Amino acid sequence: MANVEKMIAETFLEMAQGLESGSYGKRPKIALTGMGSEHGEENAMEAALMAAKDGVDVYYIGSLEAEGVTTVKVADDEEGHKKMEEMLANGEVDGAVTMHFPFPIGVSTVGRVVTPAKGREMFVANTTGTSSADRIEGMIKNTIYGIIAAKTCGIANPTVGILNVDGARQTEKALKELQEHGYDITFAESARADGGCVMRGNDVLQGTPDIMVTDSLTGNIMVKMLSSAATGGSFEATGYGYGPGIGEGYEQLVMIVSRASGAPVIAGAIRYAAQLVRNKVFEVAKAEFAAAKKAGLK
């Protein structure tokens, strides 16, 4: 009887929170490490409060407190990281947003930006971490990771463009072989007159593809430039940060922002994490890896 009453109470609480935030269903629990920012702890707490208004239970790991956010007190950044990892391991939170994390080889992050020319969102695959020690293999995997992130965020048939960097043509060839063997991938067409799925700088600014595939170092620079272009570079003001670590068999949701990320970007990263939780990113990943392997991905 007590369990039934608890379920009823939780249901009514979720309904009340949904009416307040406009977001229904179980609220994702996302941790945020607040120490270490170049803009101070207050910047991170501001982000936590912004995201909490959108139906996310934010667990702020740091020294500040505020109504609407659960604070987990720690003395410094090192203790904060240990606490974050502990909360993830224990299942106390569904995911975490932090400024650095030692992802294993094979796992890298899919950033999400707002492009300046037309205000289109674009996923950048990838931005931190190492998908593979081999550059071409890494960019092929980055493509799969980008598709996973985009599909989980509601784009049923995302378009893929390959940035014109070293290895772009080899990556194109390999991806088209996967396509020929049954892997469902849709290539974008460059906005430049010569078209094709290899993207130029114009395509970056316009957000031509849903997913821009590149190596993680180039992707990292791309996110930094697009998110802080209007501020002079020291304050990342737009977008969703450097994204979640994705890799085959990896089921820990850790999102990356930078020390230069402003409150709007950190709040965006928390919302990005919540979207991935609500739409079951790990289930999407399993299905996508299975489809790619069936088509010959090694």
Image: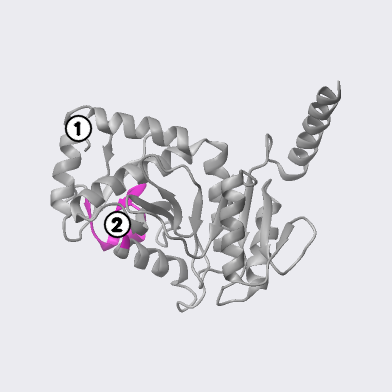
Q: Amino acid at mark 2?
A: Asp
Can residue 154 be seen at all in this image of the molecule? Answer: no
Q: Is residue 119 magenta?
A: no
Circle on res. 203: 2
Q: Are marks 2 and 1 in contact (CB under 8 Å)?
A: no
**Crowding near pointer 1: few (<14 within 10 Å), some, many (20+)?**
some
Specify the quadrant that holds the N terminus.
Answer: top right
Q: Is residue 208 magenta?
A: yes
Q: Tell me where the magenta segment starts and ends, as one range.
A: 198-216
Q: Earlier in the sequence, mark 2 or mark 1?
A: 2
Left or right of 96 on screen, residue 185: left
Left or right of 51 on screen, residue 141: left
Picture coordinates of residue 33 (x, y %)?
Answer: 60, 63
Q: Amino acid at mark 1?
A: Gly
Q: Place residue 174 in its image quadrant.
A: top left
Specify the quadrant that holds the C terminus.
Answer: top left
Circle on res. 296: 1
